[in-house]
Image: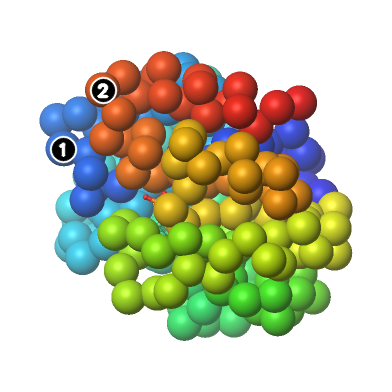
Amino acid sequence: MHPALVSSRLYGIVDLGYTAEEELEATTAALIGGGADLIQLRAKGLEKDKILALGRRIQPICRKTGVPFIVNDHADLAIELDADGLHIGQDDGSHDETRKLIGTEMLLGRSTHSPEQARQALAEGFDYIGFGPLFPTPTKQGRPGIGLEHVGTIQQEVGTRIPVFCIGGIKRSNLPEVVAAGARRVVIVSDLLTAADTTEATHEARLLLGD
Ligand code: 3NM
């Protein structure tokens, strides 16, 4: 397991679908202050120049606090931003192609949506995976929830080798059942970003994950 990820439990995403541009720094700081162990910039549908400008505001906050900064989708932007990692989906190219682009140092994560995809991502050499969506979610529309059925198995088979971050429709309210199903690590987006106090919500989620 990559040393930077061994103790990671809660993955926070600054998603421009929820976070207003002027709140970028405050939201990043709130997620980190509440206990997020990784931060991803997710800006679906925005121009690359725009994403670059947003990333330039988040990256230094992550660097200063020692929290890995992960860029979604764009290898070139991850390089340009001196990010600590790149996250890619199933349709964003192979592990080896992407690794060649970003070099050996950067973390490389993959979204997976079934047990087969999770096993494959481990075999291909990804540093971590997202596994979901567990529940239907407005943040990623058009995908059915895969439920909790495979969470325990994938945590045992894959999650003991590389971090498995369960994702999709996870909230503080259902986090206990996700943990009870065997999840050790999670990504939570809307429940933290739409909370009245993101720092407090993140802290609550971190406590619900347990030791
Ligand atoms: N990826 P929320 S689910 C960004 O299954 C994303 O790969 C998913 O947001 C996947 O916590 C998802 O608001 C949305 O449901 C997560």
Left or right: where 88 falls relative to 6: left
Above or below for 27 versus 14? above
Q: Of helix, strand and loop, which one carries label 1?
A: loop
Who's the residue at 81% across and 50% down the image? Answer: 1
Report the disc number at residue 196: 2
Who's the residue at 57% across and 65% down the image? Answer: 147
Between 84 and 116, the residue placed more toward the observer is 116
Viewport quadrant of the C terminus: top right
Mark 2 or mark 1: which comes first in sequence? 1
Residue 197 appears at what percent x and percent y? 31, 19
Between 153 and 45, the residue placed more toward the observer is 153
User: Would you call the spot at circle 2 few (<14 residues within 10 Å), some (14-19), or many (20 or more)?
Assistant: few
Amino acid type at circle 2 is: Ala
What count of labels does the image hold? 2
Above or below for 19 versus 119? above
Place residue 142 in its image quadrant: bottom left
Residue 94 appears at what percent x and percent y? 59, 81
Residue 66 makes an appearance in the image: no
Q: Is mark 1 within 8 Å of ligand 1?
A: no
Residue 73 makes an appearance in the image: yes
Report the disc number at residue 93: none
Q: Quadrant of ligand 1?
A: bottom left
Q: CA distance from mark 2 to mark 1?
A: 14 Å
- Are circles 2 and 1 on residues that touch, CB within 8 Å? no
User: Would you call the spot at circle 1 few (<14 residues within 10 Å), some (14-19), or many (20 or more)?
Assistant: few
Who's the residue at 48% across and 68% down the image? Answer: 145
Task: Give the residue at mark 1.
Answer: 20
Who's the residue at 62% across and 76% down the image? Answer: 114
Place residue 210 in its image quadrant: top right
Amino acid type at circle 1 is: Ala
Above or below for 102 versus 186? below
